[in-house]
Image (cartoon, rainbow, N blue to C red):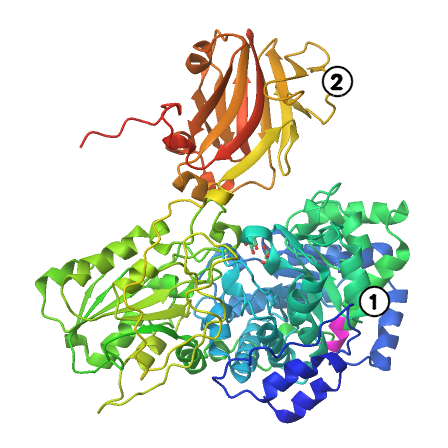
């Protein structure tokens, strides 16, 4: 990093310790341990790297004064390109459009750079053709997670988890600048990056978007990224950057996506907010609100979901830290606030969200917001403040008077090609974790057997947010400017010296000196990558094929070099035991040749490229994460070529499910959040509610169900439901639960029941995964066999529902009883319990295995 810039940054009080770290940093030196900024007692007052410009402020005031309410609300609205036409941008004075992950103009993943640019021009021209007195150009935002990663043919840099391991601040600045030029080539002016989450539990499916669990490193990178991307808008290749997701996204319990952070204020101030301090001081113009919520672990104070957290968005970020750019909401994040829908949410605006990301329901959202301002539910001053901020950023970033195609990089396909830089980033990100027997560096005169599902797969190297949102539904052919790891090996030793056998079956034929195995996680994004509480972090439990391939090659008696592709550390002792060399390669992106660059010796021997990477996250030593166990390798660990660090044979923890986290409670006396009990008849439904003393019938006219509070285990702990006509009694969580890991841990839906009147018709226990999605099991036989008045515990394996087509990844209704008269029973202690399917008394409802 340029020393002049560093001292500029250090001019403000709080950055100094972090800066000192940055300054003293050789490219491969990890941030010195213990170099923490002084403990903060309150949100710091920061000085933005982009100072107020009186001329811009005057212009903002002038434009604002010329605007109608509809124009202002339009400016505060961000719609998705699939749901809005240029004409509508004009008609509704839309402030911004975005393309979500896996969304492309013309809905084609192969859309050309020219087509992206042309759509951007059309949106821009439409925004300049409104009947506003002073037209305001629309701004287009995109994720650009690791390079301009939604674009066909763009270079994909390693995901942040790998860049963090590189511990190279200067490299991040270059990557951000390179990515920005590619973004401008497609006519886009704004990136939703950097993610500055400080991830504490890597069961979170977004861990790979995080640089490190070390707040000081995240802070340094955050500064570098913002500088690289924005560069104070001095030239054509700059874009507006976004620090996200504010605040505490990396702190959620058990690493649950969009979950609850139950941490102290001190942790918020000193750990999770560090990236924002850095970003703001570097001049970041946008902060994205987070899906998570926060409850103070010391005081119990509930700050709620961040989109509604006025104390943080306005109090901390804007008032205390002095952030004068704008806050954008996350994808329908506002819709998750109590009392809000995707189409209406005064509380988010009042809390301080300035621009609402409302991908589809933007039209209704605009109408509702206008009405709420007119009704006084949103103060006019709040609207003016939001629009002032948006206009300020648009003016600062040079958006006015610059048609997307007028940019120097516009349409330049070369601006999306940064292959050498990305290949260097791959080399720097590799972390050597095991190095036994002097196998490294690998000689080039050897015959190599290459195995593993990751060896010849760009999609696996790239992970999520690569052309598609989840990183799935792509093949190597979708990445025309990319190389697999295999192609790097072929280049290193010559085509003739490589035998490729993905499943390792060729090992039996012999004729090789060395095995190179590339195994790892398959792509995922956001909640789809969460490892649920009941599940272990053991890689081979989720991916048994990887252990199998290593076992298959082990018997050949040749050295095994394992390259592990993953978005986070996993428990891999079994894989390490089968390898002489074990390299964490993270999600390297399009430049797979960077792996062979480091593994193989120079021509004529000697190290070609030294390993420089060091862990940005601890590597687990046990299958079930817990705070008590020391990691196998701590943050900062990473070997070099010459180090012969023997791990010996590591113990293998074969735990199948994590006991302390193996229950998902749904109902017991009262609703257990996020679940609520309901009754339904036909299309109508109502919540059962919390009142223990009130019985009711539903619907009031011609009731189908009668609900009473009764005792099954303890006083008033159960609901007795009496069917008078066909109806349904069920629990729902509209945000859905991912029960894949629970199913893997042999979970069952379990509840206590006392039958009061035996059924004469089917009693369907079902699980639902959204409209038209679900599966059921008839319990009439089971329930009729119980004697009236006695308590039983019913356990129905999740596998039964999966067999019948349930999508376990998105369960909205974990428990539902549909029946008709006559039937009456009391229900309580409804939950999903890992291991319960293994009990002898579990309902036998699995489809009979096909006879071989
Ligand atoms: C979009 C993503 C977005 C996600 C949110 C997807 O359909 O493509 O960009 O992050 O929805 O749930
Ligand atoms: C993600 C954001 C992303 C947005 C737009 C959301 O689902 O949480 O990180 O910027 O989608 O794709």
Q: CA distance from mark 2 to mark 1?
A: 47 Å
Q: Position of residue 12 (x, y in %)?
A: 76, 83
- Quarter holding the C terminus is top left
Residue annotated with mark 2: 694
Residue 556 lies in quadrant: bottom left
Instruction: Note whether residue 140 is visible.
Output: yes
Residue annotated with mark 1: 319
Q: Position of residue 643 (x, y in %)?
A: 33, 81
Question: Helix, strand, or loop for circle 2?
Answer: loop
Q: Residue at x 46, y 13 (%)?
A: 783
Give the main secondary structure of the magenta stretch: helix
Whether pointer 2 and pointer 1 mark residues with C-beta atoms closer than 8 Å, the reply is no
Select label 2 or label 1 by which is in front. 2
Q: Position of residue 682 (x, y in %)?
A: 61, 19
- In this rendering, is residue 602 above or below 223? below
Question: Helix, strand, or loop for circle 1?
Answer: helix
Q: Which residues are magenta?
A: 393-397
Q: Choose between 463 and 404: the one closer to the eye.
A: 463
Badge 1: residue crowd in 10 Å (few <14, some 14–19, many ≥20): some
Instruction: Note whether residue 291 is visible.
Output: no
Q: How many marks?
A: 2
Q: Is residue 110 left or right of residue 10?
A: left
């Amino acid at each position: 990093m340029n020393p002049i810039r560093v001292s500029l940054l250090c001019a403000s009080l709080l950055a100094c310790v972090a800066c000192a770290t940055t300054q003293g940093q050789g490219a491969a030196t990890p941030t010195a341990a213990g170099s923490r900024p002084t403990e903060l007692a309150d949100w710091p007052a920061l000085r933005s790297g982009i100072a107020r410009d009186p001329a811009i402020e005057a212009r903002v005031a002038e434009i604002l004064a010329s605007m109608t309410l509809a124009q202002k609300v339009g400016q505060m609205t961000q719609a998705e390109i699939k749901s809005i036409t240029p004409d509508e941008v004009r008609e509704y004075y839309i402030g911004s459009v975005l393309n979500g992950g896996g969304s492309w103009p013309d809905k084609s993943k192969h859309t050309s750079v020219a087509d992206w640019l042309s759509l951007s021009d059309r949106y821009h021209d439409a925004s300049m053709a409104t009947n506003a007195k002073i037209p305001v150009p629309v701004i287009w935002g995109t994720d650009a997670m690791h390079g301009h990663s939604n674009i066909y043919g763009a270079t994909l840099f390693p995901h942040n988890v790998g860049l963090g391991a590189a511990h190279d601040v200067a490299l991040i600045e270059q990557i951000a600048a390179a990515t920005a030029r590619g973004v401008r080539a497609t006519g886009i002016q704004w990136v939703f990056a950097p993610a500055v989450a400080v991830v504490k539990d890597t069961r979170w499916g977004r861990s790979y978007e995080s640089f490190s669990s070390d707040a000081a490193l995240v802070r340094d990178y955050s500064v570098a990224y913002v500088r690289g991307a924005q560069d104070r808008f001095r030239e054509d290749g700059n874009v507006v950057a976004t620090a996200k997701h504010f605040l505490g996204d990396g702190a959620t319990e058990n690493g649950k996506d969009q979950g609850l952070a139950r941490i102290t204020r001190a942790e918020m101030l000193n750990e999770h907010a560090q990236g924002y301090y850095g970003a703001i001081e570097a001049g970041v113009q946008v902060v994205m609100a987070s899906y998570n919520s926060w409850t103070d672990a010391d005081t119990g104070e509930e700050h709620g979901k961040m989109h509604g957290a006025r104390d943080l968005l306005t109090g901390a970020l804007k008032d205390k830290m002095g952030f004068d750019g704008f806050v954008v909401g996350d994808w329908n994040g506002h819709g998750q606030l109590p009392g809000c829908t995707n189409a209406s949410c005064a509380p988010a605006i009042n809390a301080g969200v300035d621009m609402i990301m409302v991908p589809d329901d933007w039209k209704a959202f605009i109408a509702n917001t206008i009405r709420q301002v007119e009704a006084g539910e949103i103060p006019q001053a709040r609207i003016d403040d939001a629009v002032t901020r948006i206009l300020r950023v648009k003016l600062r970033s040079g958006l006015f008077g610059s048609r997307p195609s007028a940019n120097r990089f516009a349409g330049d396909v070369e601006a999306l090609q940064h292959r050498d830089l990305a290949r260097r980033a791959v080399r720097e990100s590799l972390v050597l974790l095991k190095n036994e027997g002097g196998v490294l560096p690998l000689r080039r005169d050897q015959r190599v057997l290459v195995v593993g599902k990751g060896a010849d797969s760009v999609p696996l190297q790239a992970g999520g947010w690569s052309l598609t949102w989840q990183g799935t539904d792509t093949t190597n052919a979708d990445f025309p400017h990319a190389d697999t790891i295999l192609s790097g090996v072929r280049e290193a030793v010559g085509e003739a010296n490589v035998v490729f056998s993905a499943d390792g079956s060729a090992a039996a034929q012999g004729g090789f000196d060395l095995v190179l195995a590339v195994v790892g996680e398959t792509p995922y994004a956001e909640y789809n990558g969460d490892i649920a509480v009941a599940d272990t972090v053991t890689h081979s439990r989720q991916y048994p094929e990887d252990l199998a391939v290593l076992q298959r090659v082990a018997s050949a008696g040749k050295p095994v070099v394992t390259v592990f592709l993953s978005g986070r550390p996993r428990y891999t002792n079994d894989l390490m035991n089968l390898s002489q060399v074990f390299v964490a390669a993270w999600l390297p992106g399009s430049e797979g040749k960077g792996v062979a660059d480091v593994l193989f010796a120079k021509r004529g021997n000697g190290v070609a490229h030294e390993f420089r990477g060091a862990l940005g996250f601890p590597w687990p030593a046990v299958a079930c994460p817990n705070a008590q166990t020391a990691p196998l390798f701590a943050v900062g660990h990473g070997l070099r070529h010459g180090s012969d660090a023997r791990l010996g044979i590591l113990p293998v923890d074969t735990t199948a499910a994590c006991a302390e986290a193996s229950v998902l409670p749904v109902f017991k006396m009262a609703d257990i959040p996020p679940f609520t009990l309901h009754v339904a008849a036909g299309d109508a439904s109502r919540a059962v509610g919390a009142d223990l003393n009130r019985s009711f019938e539903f619907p009031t006219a011609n009731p189908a169900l009668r609900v009473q509070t009764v005792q099954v285990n303890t006083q008033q702990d159960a609901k007795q439901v009496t069917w008078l006509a066909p109806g349904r009694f069920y629990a729902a969580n509209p945000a859905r639960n991912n029960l894949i890991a629970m199913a893997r841990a042999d979970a069952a839906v379990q509840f206590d029941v006392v039958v009061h009147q035996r059924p004469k018709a089917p009693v369907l226990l079902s699980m639902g995964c959204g409209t038209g999605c679900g599966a059921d099991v008839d319990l009439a036989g089971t329930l009729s066999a119980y004697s009236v008045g006695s308590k039983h515990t019913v356990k129905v394996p999740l596998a039964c529902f999966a067999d019948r087509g349930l999508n376990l990844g998105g369960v909205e209704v974990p428990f539902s009883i549909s029946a008709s008269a006559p039937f009456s029973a009391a229900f309580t202690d409804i939950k999903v319990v890992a291991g319960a399917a293994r009990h002898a008394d579990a309902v036998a409802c699995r489809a009979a295995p096909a006879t071989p």
